[in-house]
Image (cartoon, rainbow, N blue to C red):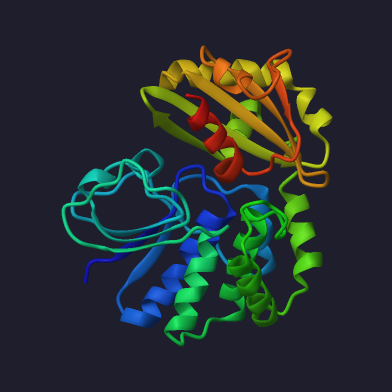
């Protein structure tokens, strides 16, 4: 039997990694088929903390899929964010909480998307609907994903359903979500070991609207100023990304997880898109109260294009 691959997006975050691993276990229970969760990039320190805490191994990394390969996409639907060859793969399903864009298949599929803060919320709801019991490990991974995507349930992306599922998963995982969650988020703020290029790739996504190509990268920290000490080299790395990908705009959001603000480093020929809303000085724009790429930064950019 051909193996089904569960695939998260490029530059994977905790939701992409943990939800794909969890869904692989659940899919096996539901269908009995051979399933493997794979990743499309290196994991970050936050995700590594979650996997180590719950004793779960990192998935195999792949760079492309062959024509006809059976896949389920997790935490994304845009082909630009997916694996090489996805256009000719056999997409059986999508589990996502983002807008639908540039997505087309040749056959019908199972598509589950909801306006919630995290893909893991959707996956656990499916478990409840189908009376599927999950292990302590899987519950821990799903809880980790929700904590990550909602900044410990404090992000504007967080919904009552995310909170409900997090509370249920907390009991199964046998952790205190506040204590565990803060330690996990702090693990992701240790940025000194990354090069500027790696910082941009920790959590970045590319988009296009009305022929404007842009990329939003995001890093979490407890000290924005510490990250900005590297601004000159960060800008050099951003200019390289712009040139290699023919981007009109590149934005790095440096998000303070304690005070819930962001400082954006903004480079490109279309910085005017950001200047319609925020003042840019020294290629930086302070964004008070902004912590979410999906809920706050992307809508801002697309409404200003």
Q: Position of residue 268 (x, y in %)?
A: 54, 15
Instruction: Reply above or below: 11 against 117.
Output: above
On screen, residue 157 versus residue 129, left or right, reads right
Residue 58 shows up from this direction: no
Residue 63 shows up from this direction: yes
Residue at the (59%, 55%) spot, across then down: 14
126 or 223: nearer the viewer = 126
Q: Quadrant of residue 272?
A: top right
On screen, residue 288 versus residue 95, left or right, reads right
Q: Quadrant of residue 32?
A: bottom left
Name the image quarter holding the N terminus: bottom left
On screen, residue 279 versus residue 159, left or right, reads right
Instruction: Reply above or below: 202 against 56.
Output: above
On screen, residue 234 versus residue 5, left or right, reads right
Task: Please tell me how many numbered marks the rendered image carries.
Answer: 0
Residue at the (54%, 62%) spot, across then down: 18
Instruction: Reply above or below: 21 against 16.
Output: below
Instruction: Reply above or below: 259 against 242.
Output: below
Q: Position of residue 238 (x, y in %)?
A: 57, 21
Residue at the (38%, 45%) spot, across then down: 82
Q: Position of residue 250 (x, y in %)?
A: 55, 23
Residue at the (32%, 73%) spot, across then down: 34
Q: Residue furthest left?
A: 106
Q: Position of residue 186 (x, y in %)?
A: 78, 51
129 or 237: nearer the viewer = 129
């Amino acid at each position: 039997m051909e193996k089904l691959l569960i695939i998260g997006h490029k530059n994977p975050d905790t939701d992409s990694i943990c939800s794909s691993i969890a869904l692989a276990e659940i899919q096996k229970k539901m269908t009995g088929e051979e399933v493997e969760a794979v990743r499309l990039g290196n994991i970050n320190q936050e995700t590594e903390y979650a996997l180590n805490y719950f004793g779960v191994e990192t998935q195999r990394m792949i760079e492309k899929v062959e024509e006809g390969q059976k896949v389920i996409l997790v935490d994304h639907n845009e082909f630009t964010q997916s694996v090489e060859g996805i256009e000719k793969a056999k997409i059986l399903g999508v589990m996502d909480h983002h807008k639908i864009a540039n997505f087309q298949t040749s056959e019908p599929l199972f598509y589950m998307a909801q306006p919630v803060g995290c893909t893991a919320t959707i996956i656990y709801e499916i478990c409840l609907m189908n009376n599927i019991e999950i292990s302590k490990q899987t519950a821990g991974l799903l809880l980790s994903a929700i904590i990550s995507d909602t900044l410990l349930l404090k992000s504007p992306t967080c919904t009552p359903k995310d909170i409900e599922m997090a509370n249920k998963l907390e009991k199964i995982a046998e952790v205190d979500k506040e204590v565990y969650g803060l330690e996990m988020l702090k693990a992701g703020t240790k940025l000194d070991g990354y090069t500027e290029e790696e910082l941009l790739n920790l959590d970045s996504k590319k988009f296009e609207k009305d022929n404007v190509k842009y990329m939003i990268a995001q890093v979490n920290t407890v000290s924005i100023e510490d990250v900005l000490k590297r601004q000159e080299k960060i800008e050099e790395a951003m200019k390289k990304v712009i040139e290699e990908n023919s981007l009109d705009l590149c934005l790095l959001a440096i998000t303070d997880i304690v005070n819930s603000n962001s400082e954006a480093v903004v480079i490109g020929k279309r910085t005017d898109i950001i200047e319609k809303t925020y003042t840019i000085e020294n290629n930086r724009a302070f964004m008070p109260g902004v912590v979410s790429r999906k809920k706050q930064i992307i809508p801002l950019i697309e409404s200003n294009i």
